[in-house]
């Protein structure tokens, strides 16, 4: 790599924010370089969104065969369905490899230079010169490392940071990859554990809870808040609790983890009630998975003298302060997008922020990201998906609203495919019918939520949903029924 090579844009990080931003910049005629310390695709493709979906699909197939086969007319002799754990894990890893190659192809197609290594920003853009970025050999593990032997130095008119986030750890129990696990460790666990405690019941915690429970691991989920999936609407959280308890998971809500001690058999987890810490108990398991959120990745990324502003463990940009943010950091010429700048920590947001960032610094007017209409999904079975406000948020804002609910138990398509567990809940403003929020638990929830996201984006009213003909029989009809329910007109409820 030539030390003096200059680019219009250097992108640091090859995940959903970085590679999409790099491609958009190249499409607009910029000379682009993307520096990635690991494999292209970032956490999402390699250690998050994609491999977990592969594992969850395996789990669904296994659960259907073992637990519901007779309902479908399939008889399996005892022991006939066996799990090859290495293949279960291996399939997810092979999928990531295919997609790694896909991004490399897109880079080649768009004439984007790909540099492997750890990037460190030595200077921002000044009157004296462009941004300077040093590249060293990546050291440490996937989430940690400050760079080793120097490889070279390159310059650019602008730098976009898209380094993602790393899992939070408990201060008294760091991940060791064997007994105390992060989500990274859980994706390649070599042997199925007989028992597992999962700390945290957000999307990551619940997806792993579903996966391991489906294959027969005894799973206990510990949540500090008073309900699982605490960011979801309360009705959805309650429905999820019922569904997953019925599947065999055990939950301890309103409960804090105060200690994890390793034992000969695995670990002893000490718990205390959040409301009364004097009330304690302990449970034992073969391993413990910690899923308590993430923090931005910026270790060894910027020379300290540049004074990169960090706020609440994330890189500061103007995305919370401006209606049309530039994603500019405190360092001139340096931008940041995606998980490294803060919530919501979602791959699709990183991509959209990257596109908006590039288009805006190129002088284009772009609608950008509507942070009030971000769809969020949890890919267990039943799936959970939402967009917009929860009922509690609408109430706290003092809005006048009405609610429409529709349960899947009476829905034709749901009955036909054996997926009657779930509901749609729509929150609508009065008197104009603005769609304030939509919340779904059940079959294909992650696919259904897009309709409500689009409706919010184009400011459609609930009457627009009602007057739209939905094909029959489909799960989409459940949205139509919930919309009708806001006016007391539901047909099949």
Image (cartoon, grey):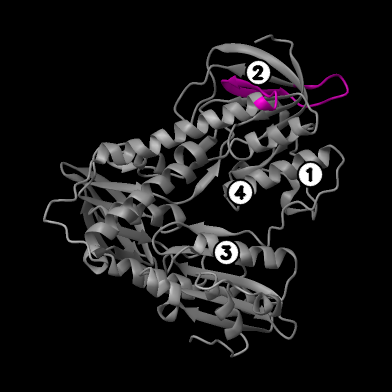
Locate residue 335, reporting x and y percent. Answer: 73, 36
Residue at figure coordinates x 55%, y 80% from the top left: 481
Q: Is residue 328 left or right of residue 191?
A: right
In the image, is residue 108 above or below residue 248? Answer: above
- Any magenta on residue 129? yes
Q: Is tag 2's residue or tag 1's residue first in the polypeptide sequence? A: 2
Q: Which residue is mark 3?
A: 449
Residue at figure coordinates x 58%, y 27% from the top left: 104
Q: Mark 4, mark 2: which one is toward the viewer?
A: 4
SS category of the residue bearing label 2: strand
Q: Mark 1, mark 4: which one is toward the viewer?
A: 4
- Any magenta on residue 329? no
Locate residue 21, reporting x and y percent. Answer: 69, 37
Q: Which residue is mark 2?
A: 134
Query: How dense is the environment of label 4, judged by Cα within 10 Å: few (below 14), some, or many (20 and up)?
Result: some
Q: Is tag 3's residue or tag 4's residue first in the polypeptide sequence? A: 4
Query: How dense is the environment of label 1, judged by Cα within 10 Å: few (below 14), some, or many (20 and up)?
Result: many
Q: Are marks 3 and 1 in contact (CB under 8 Å)?
A: no
In-front residue for pair 157/483: 483
Q: Which residues are magenta?
A: 109-131
Corner quadrant of residue 153: top right
Q: Which residue is mark 1?
A: 326
Q: Is residue 176 left or right of residue 349?
A: left
Q: Are marks 3 and 4 in contact (CB under 8 Å)?
A: no
Q: Mark 2, mark 3: which one is toward the viewer?
A: 3
Query: How dense is the environment of label 2, judged by Cα within 10 Å: few (below 14), some, or many (20 and up)?
Result: many
Q: CA distance from mark 2 to mark 1?
A: 24 Å
Corner quadrant of residue 13: top right
Q: Which residue is mark 4?
A: 348
């Amino acid at each position: 790599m030539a030390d003096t090579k200059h680019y219009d844009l250097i992108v640091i990080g090859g995940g959903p924010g970085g590679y999409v931003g790099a491609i958009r910049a190249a499409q607009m005629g910029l000379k682009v370089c993307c520096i990635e310390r690991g494999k292209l695709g970032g956490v999402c493709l390699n250690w998050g969104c994609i491999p977990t979906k592969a594992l969850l699909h395996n789990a669904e197939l296994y659960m259907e065969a073992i637990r519901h086969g007779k309902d479908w007319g399939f008889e399996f002799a005892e022991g006939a369905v066996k799990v090859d754990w290495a293949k279960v894990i291996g399939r997810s890893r092979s999928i990531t490899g295919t997609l790694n190659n896909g991004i490399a192809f897109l880079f080649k197609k768009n004439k984007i230079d790909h540099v492997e290594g750890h990037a460190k920003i030595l200077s921002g853009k000044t009157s004296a010169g462009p941004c300077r970025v040093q590249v060293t050999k990546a050291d440490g593990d996937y989430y940690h490392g400050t760079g080793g032997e120097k490889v070279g130095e390159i310059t650019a008119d602008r730098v976009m940071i898209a380094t993602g986030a790393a899992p939070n750890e408990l201060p008294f129990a760091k991940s060791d990859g064997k007994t105390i696990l992060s989500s990274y460790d859980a994706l390649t666990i070599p042997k199925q554990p007989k028992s597992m405690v999962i700390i945290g019941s957000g999307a990551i915690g619940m997806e792993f809870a579903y996966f391991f429970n489906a294959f027969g691991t005894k799973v206990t989920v510990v949540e500090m808040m008073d309900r699982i999936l605490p960011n979801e609407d309360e009705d959805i959280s309650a429905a999820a609790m019922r569904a997953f308890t019925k599947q065999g998971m055990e939950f301890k809500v309103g409960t804090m983890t105060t200690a994890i001690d390793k034992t000969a058999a695995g670990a002893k987890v000490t718990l205390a009630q959040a409301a009364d810490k004097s009330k304690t108990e302990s449970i034992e398991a073969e391993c413990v998975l910690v899923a308590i959120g993430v923090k931005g990745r910026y270790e060894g990324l910027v020379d300290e003298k540049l004074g990169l502003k960090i706020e609440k463990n994330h890189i500061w940009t103007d995305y919370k302060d401006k209606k049309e943010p530039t994603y500019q950091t405190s360092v001139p010429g340096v931008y940041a997008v995606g998980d490294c700048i803060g919530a919501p920590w979602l791959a699709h947001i990183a991509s959209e922020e990257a596109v908006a960032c590039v288009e805006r610094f190129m002088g284009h007017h772009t609608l950008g990201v509507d942070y009030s209409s971000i769809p969020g999904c949890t890919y267990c079975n039943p799936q959970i998906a939402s967009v917009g406000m929860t009922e509690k948020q609408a109430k706290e804002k003092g809005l006048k609203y009405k609610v429409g609910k529709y349960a899947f138990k009476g829905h034709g398509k749901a009955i036909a495919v054996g997926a009657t567990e779930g509901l749609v809940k729509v929150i609508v403003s009065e008197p104009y019918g603005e769609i304030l929020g939509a919340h779904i638990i059940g079959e294909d929830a992650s696919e259904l939520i897009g309709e409500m996201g689009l409706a919010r984006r184009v400011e459609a009213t609930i009457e627009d949903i009602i007057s739209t003909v939905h094909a029959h029989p489909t799960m989409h009809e459940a949205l139509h029924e919930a919309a009708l329910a806001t006016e007391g007109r539901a047909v099949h409820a």
